[in-house]
Image (tube, grey):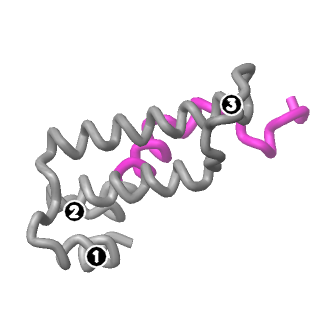
Amino acid sequence: MQIEVDEYISQFKEGYFSPLAMLARMTEELGELSREVNHFYGEKPKKKSEKENTVEEELGDLLFVLICFANSLNIDLEQAHDLVLHKFNTRDRNRWTRVEEKGGE
């Protein structure tokens, strides 16, 4: 995904936004996702005049900006993923009740 996004962005002279602008974009997209989740799962229905978006679409927008952010900072998201999973599998390995332990104790 990072290569595909980089190929897309590389078509344009402007390139990636600055880290601060990227963070602002990510915050904006997170707000749009929050709004969509609130409409779909929460107590606040949309106004009839509001455009129908989906949680999937908003997650996609957020993912695109996250990938742009990582690319602009030369961060390999696969390595970042591996680091966080290692952390969860070591530091947090006994933090949560495993599925096979439910009801067996």
**Dots 2 and 1: beta carbons under 8 Å?**
no
Q: Which residue is mark 2?
A: 71
Q: Identify the amino acid type marked 3.
A: Lys
Q: Which residue is mark 3?
A: 46
- Residue 59, given in percent of the width and then of the height, sits at 52, 50
- The residue under the point 49% across, 37% down is 32
- Element type at marker 3? loop
| Left or right of residue 4, residue 34 in this image | right
| Left or right of residue 13, residue 64 in this image | right
Q: Identify the amino acid type marked 2.
A: Asn
- The residue under the point 49% across, 47% down is 89
Foreground residue among 47 and 17: 47
Tag on residue 8?
1
Classify 10 Å Cα crowding around label 3: few (below 14), some (14-19), many (20 and above): some
- Element type at marker 2? helix
- The residue under the point 16% across, 60% down is 16
* Mark 1 / mark 3, whichever is N-terminal: 1
What is the CA distance from the residue labelled 2 to the residue labelled 1? 12 Å
Magenta run includes residue 84? yes
Tag on residue 98?
none
